[in-house]
Image: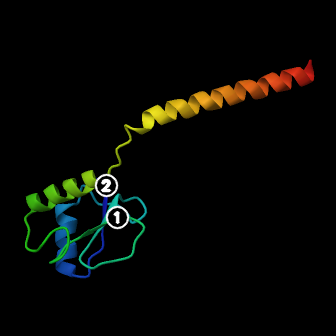
Amino acid sequence: MKAFIDCDCEILQKTLELFLKDHAASAQDCDFVISDEPQSLTKPLFLIGEDGDLALPFSKQMLLSRLEDFQSSLRVDLSGYDAAEAEICALFDEFKAKIIEILRRQDG
């Protein structure tokens, strides 16, 4: 879990930095952003506050638990793509074989 912390409240900012020092990342390298204000971002937003993902006050354990749940909800289930990937690979292999056959006929 890698999070970028961007809070308007300085106390909350410092608290989160202390609690999440092992999970802190830059805005470019993070999995999601933690903030106390709604923002328009390309990364998912974990909002702390009254109508957010975590209400104040909270403990470190509550924070970590909610963040783990939040990150789990972001993961896409890729198990259904395995069959499609195999089918696509087979199609590419067939296409490649036909192209090679055409090229060999041209050279022969």
For disc 1, the marked residue is 44
For disc 2, the marked residue is 74
Q: Nearer the viewer, residue 28 or 90?
A: 90
**Disc 2 secondary structure class:** helix
Q: Nearer the viewer, residue 42 or 59?
A: 42
**Disc 1 secondary structure class:** loop
Return the disc, 1 or 2, that comes first in the chain's sequence: 1
The quadrant holding residue 64 is bottom left
Tell whether label 2 touches label 1 (CB within 8 Å). yes
Is 61 left, or right, of 13 in this rendering? left
In this figure, which colouring scheme has been used for the structure? rainbow
Task: Reply above or below: 84 against 100.
Answer: below
Task: Reply above or below: 45 against 9.
Answer: above
The quadrant holding residue 12 is bottom left
Location of the C terminus by quadrant is top right
Residue 49: percent from the left, percent from the top? Answer: 17, 76
Residue 79: percent from the left, percent from the top? Answer: 37, 37
Residue 69: percent from the left, percent from the top? Answer: 20, 54
Instruction: Please name the amino acid that badge 2 sits on.
Output: Leu
Instruction: Please name the amino acid that badge 1 sits on.
Output: Pro
What residue do we see at 30% from left, 74% from top? 6
In whole angstroms, how far apart are the C-alphas of marks 1 and 2?
A: 8 Å
How busy is the neighbourhood of tag 2: few (under 14 within 10 Å), some, or many (20 plus)?
Answer: few
Is 3 left, or right, of 67 in this rendering? right
